[in-house]
Image (cartoon, rainbow, N blue to C red):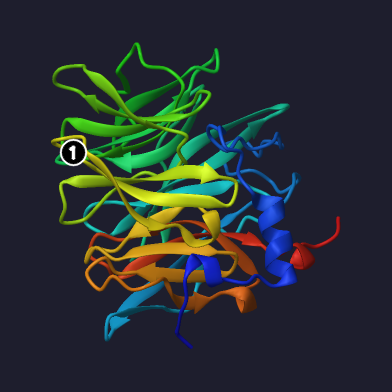
Amino acid sequence: MVEATSPEGIRLSAVAVLALALLAPLAVEGQDRPRPTQEPEDTVLVPVGPVQPDIYLADLSILDGLHYVGPLQNITNRMYSYDNQPAFTPDSRSLLYTTEYGYGDRVQTEIHRFYLSSRRETRITRTDQSEYSPTPVPGDRAFSTIRVEADSTQRIWRFTMQGMDGEVLFRNLTNVGYHAWGNETTLLLYVLGSPPTVRIADLTTGQIEVVAGGVGRSLHKIPNRNAWSFVERVSADEAWINEVNIGTHEVRRLIATVGGGEFHAWTPEGVLLMALGSRIYQWDPELGRAWRRIADLENEGITVSRMAVSPDGSKIAIVGHPLPELVPER
């Protein structure tokens, strides 16, 4: 069932409120660090830690302007292993994501690739540091990532799709939490601080400009527009999706977020998606209507945080956290 609603009019069930309270992000948090677990040699971690999110894949279709989410497939299926931050490759045939490995008391993250047609999974990076937030580099067979280095410095790195030839971008810029490419040479960055800021960085000139403060962690290139989107946090329960022009750096508000959240995604048609608890909503800038509910995944037993839509618009990747009452006792 589809319904029209607004952020102010959304009411949460007791289950959703509990789930959101448990999963509420820190305002100035960097990467979501996994906790130590044990090492099964060169494979993904054996489940011994706290419950972690999984990545789900589903068909995404559209009818009469409304998007529909098909049946979910859990492509990681490791309840106690951290799997997060999905990003589709430009050809829509595979998905990059972050997963964790453990070495005794030490834990780190690496980048994996999941091939949609064969359902084959490969490990890309094999480093001594943690890599997060894999993001395809425009016009290049490479991806960028946030590397947490040995001294906990967070910088942007570039790797080939085989995980080779790692090189740091913007060597003097540290405390980078998240990033989004605007074109082959320009990025939007989330930088930790008090408050956290979003900055535009140019690889050609090396220039870095702060464009806003007090922001959320979700950054995206807006399809078919020379602009990015980011979240402006006004208070604990109020936030806005903002647009920043890549060329002029002008910032303007688009719409209040669903329930004060921050994680969002864009479809190739330029429709905005956000989740609140187990429900997913859409907003079409062309129509100018309120948020409209397009899916409810409560029966799947998960709440939703991050989402990613494939460039061809046929698939959606969802980071799902199990509802508290469905987590098995240990």
Outermost residue toward the right in this view: 330
Q: Residues within 10 Å of mark 1 (few under 14, many from 20)?
A: some
Q: Between residues 178 and 74, which one lies in front from this camera angle?
A: 178
Task: Give the residue displayed 48% in from the left and 50% down from the top.
Answer: 239
| SS at circle 1 | loop
Left or right position of 186 against 266: left
Q: Is residue 25 above or below residue 7?
A: above
Instruction: Give percent across and percent down for residue 55.
Output: 51, 58
Q: Is residue 147 visible?
A: yes
Report whether 312 appears left or right of 29. Answer: left
Q: Quadrant of residue 64?
A: bottom left
Residue 76 in the image: x percent, y percent? 54, 57
Q: Is residue 220 above or below residue 78?
A: above
Name which quarter of the figure residue 218 lies in.
top left
Above or below, comparing residue 86 to residue 108 in the picture: below
**Which of the pair 291/309 is nearer the observer?**
291
**Rendered residue at 74%/70% (across/down):** 14
Residue located 61% across and 39% down the image: 26
Query: For mark 1, what is the residue?
Result: 246
Q: In the image, 36: left or right of 193?
A: right
Q: Position of residue 271 (x, y in %)?
A: 29, 66
- Residue at 27% x, 80% y is 65
Q: Nearer the viewer, residue 280 or 288?
A: 288
Name the kind of residue labelled 1 in the image.
Ile
Number of on-image labels: 1
Viewer-nearest residue: 273 or 112:
273
Quadrant in the picture for the C terminus: bottom right
Please state the horizontal and vertical placement of residue 12, each as a whole percent of the image: 65, 70
- Asked if one can make out residue 262 in the rendered structure from this viewpoint, the answer is no
